[in-house]
Image (cartoon, rainbow, N blue to C red):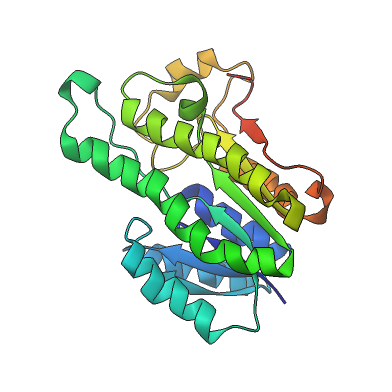
Amino acid sequence: MRYALVTGGSRGIGKAISIKLAQDGFYVLINFKTNIEEAVDTLNKIKSNGGDGELLQFDISNSQDIKNVLGNWVENNNDKLIEVLVNNAGIAKDNLMVFMSDNEWKSVISTNQDSFFYVTRLLIKNMLINKCGKIINVVSLSGQKGLPGQVNYSAAKGAVIAATKALAMEVGKKKVTVNAVAPGFIRTDMTKDLDEKQLKQLIPLNRFGEVEEVAEVVSFLASGKASYITGEIISVNGGMYS
């Protein structure tokens, strides 16, 4: 059995990734913070398709919570290797910088950036020991080109993009790859209030993307087909930015 962890794996892009990896044969650890109903729904969908997994409830921005829950799972399952880590969980609190509060800055940085460090640090040692691992960070178009009203989100995702490239150089010799997927406008809860009709005019493919289209790229990066790819940022944005 091969094991994968998807942070923020109960909703939106994370849900699609969890379901796809289960279809690929992974036992999927689905992280969530508060929405137990969506988490259970994701796990039920996986099991109804013949896959398997379990739920892990912890706050990805809280290092102690991560140690208590994820660390405990690793300790109690020392014969099992989480060989695929998808750092997907994130939040956005959009505002113009001139009006941005301390909380809007700090919470977005902590949830999107610190979580990458805390979760990856906990799992990467076993990947290096076993010379087997794939780390996939879900970043954003916002972290590549910047978007107005998202100085906090762009800063956080841009930092993870840079960290992806640096970590890839650190761990490549141990057969651990580190890549990122950068979605553009994808139909999720985070984009439901956007003016899709107006924004799609900025996109060469003239539409928002679907969560399954992001999950397919993650699936590829998690597979042996991507064994010679590391340090890359793959855009899934309909041609909006490259």
Q: Quadrant of residue 56?
A: bottom left
In the displayed structure, 38 sits above or below 186; it is below
Choose top left, top right, bottom left or bottom right for residue 197: top left
Q: Nearer the viewer, residue 162 or 20?
A: 162
Q: Is residue 121 above or below residue 89?
A: below
Q: Residue 75's spot in the image, x, y percent?
A: 51, 82
Q: Residue at x 46, y 27 (%)?
A: 142
Q: Which part of the image, by quadrant, shows the N terminus?
A: bottom right
Residue 100 coordinates in the image, percent (x, y): 19, 28
In the rendered structure, the answer to whether residue 23 lies left or right of residue 99 reads right
- The answer, for residue 31, to whether it is visible in the render is yes
Residue 139, position in %: x, y?
51, 38
| Quadrant position of residue 21 | bottom right
Q: Give the left or right position of residue 173, taking residue 158 as reference.
A: right
**Which residue is nearer to you in this view: 73 or 142?**
73
Give x and y (percent) for residue 237: 59, 27
